[in-house]
């Protein structure tokens, strides 16, 4: 494997906690992923509520409120690698994964995957949060990789990241005894002026440290914005909680080898609530309530 990143890119990631990678997916991979997703959207027209089933019994396909046959609004597909050979192959082999191995490797494992979509006219937004608060491990060498299945623009709800926050605090995601899956609105308002928008052509990817504060706004355009999102981790980072998007492939070593070792770093945080519904969007809705 050839390291895809320059030293300048490595230094930028270490400083900012995120990195944009061009051509993370091949044109054939991108086309095949979009074909499968298009079929799932068509299938969703037959349903009026979350449907399908993951290995823990929750719905696999989560629908935005207002979804209907005429205006489908699939907002989350949990663990698509279990129902699509195309998604499984892309998870195991892509340029962004090589970059993860360069940054956190050489031994890298798969943790979980999902598709988050903002179809035109849908109101889906993601409040500011940190992924580590959902998938706590013995150390924080975890990477969220967001693969752009569509061109991501300023108008269709791009990812917003707050540079450098991966070096700071683990912020509370419990408020008033309720797990909201988000930081407070006051803190979000404070951090938002510092945020950077991650835009780029389909096939690109954004690599994001698990502690980085991030979120996104609704899609206000006529263009879709769909992301294939994969969590990878250092092989010696061991989960301290139940995987919130369980998969039969959880823990598969996708680069390097299994070492049978554990590495621990010091941190303190409240244990997250295991989601009872199809996705964390309903947890975040509690923050508004």
Image (cartoon, rainbow, N blue to C red):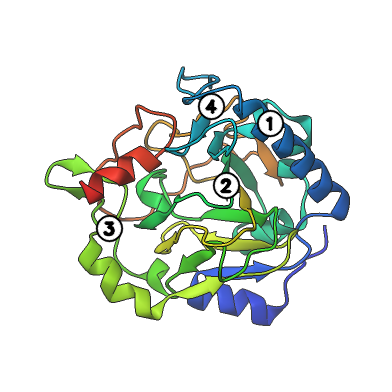
Residue 70, percent from left and from top: 60, 35
Mark 4 or mark 3: which is in front? 4
- Closer to us: 118 or 142: 118
Quickly name the residue at label 3: 183
Q: Residue at x 73, y 77 (%)?
A: 6
Residue 154, percent from left and from top: 56, 71
Position of 141 compared to 249: left or right?
Answer: left
Quickly name the residue at label 4: 60
Mark 4 or mark 2: which is in front? 2
Is residue 39 in view from this perspective? Answer: yes
- Label 3 close to label 1 by CB (< 8 Å): no
Position of 209 compared to 187: left or right?
Answer: right
The furthest residue to the right: 28
Quickly name the residue at label 2: 117
Q: Earlier in the sequence, mark 4 or mark 3?
A: 4
Quickly name the residue at label 1: 42
Q: Secondary structure at mark 3?
A: loop
């Amino acid at each position: 494997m050839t390291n895809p990143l320059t030293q300048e890119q490595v230094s930028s990631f270490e400083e900012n906690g995120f990195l944009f990678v061009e051509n993370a997916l091949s044109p054939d991979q991108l086309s095949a992923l979009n074909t499968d997703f298009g079929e799932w959207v068509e299938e969703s027209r037959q349903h009026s509520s979350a449907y399908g089933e993951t290995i823990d019994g929750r719905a696999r396909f989560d629908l935005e409120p207002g979804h209907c046959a005429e205006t489908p609004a699939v907002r989350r597909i949990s663990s698509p690698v279990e129902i699509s050979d195309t998604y499984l192959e892309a998870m195991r082999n892509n340029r962004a994964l090589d970059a993860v191995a360069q940054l956190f490797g050489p031994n890298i494992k798969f943790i979980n995957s999902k598709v988050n979509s903002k179809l035109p006219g849908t109101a889906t937004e993601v409040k500011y949060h940190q992924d580590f608060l959902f998938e706590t491990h013995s150390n924080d060498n975890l990477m969220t990789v967001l693969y752009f299945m569509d061109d991501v623009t300023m108008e269709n709800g791009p990812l917003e990241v707050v540079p450098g926050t991966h070096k700071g605090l683990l912020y509370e995601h419990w408020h008033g005894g309720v797990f909201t899956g988000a930081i407070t609105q006051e803190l979000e308002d404070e951090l938002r002026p510092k945020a950077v928008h991650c835009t780029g052509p389909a096939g690109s990817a954004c690599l994001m440290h698990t502690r980085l504060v991030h979120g996104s706004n609704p899609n206000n355009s006529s263009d879709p914005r769909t992301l294939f999102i994969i969590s990878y981790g250092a092989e010696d980072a061991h989960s301290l909680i139940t995987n919130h998007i369980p998969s039969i492939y959880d823990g598969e070593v996708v680069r390097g080898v299994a070492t049978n070792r554990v590495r621990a770093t010091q941190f303190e945080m409240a244990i997250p609530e295991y989601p009872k519904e199809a996705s964390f969007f309903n947890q975040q809705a509690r923050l508004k309530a």
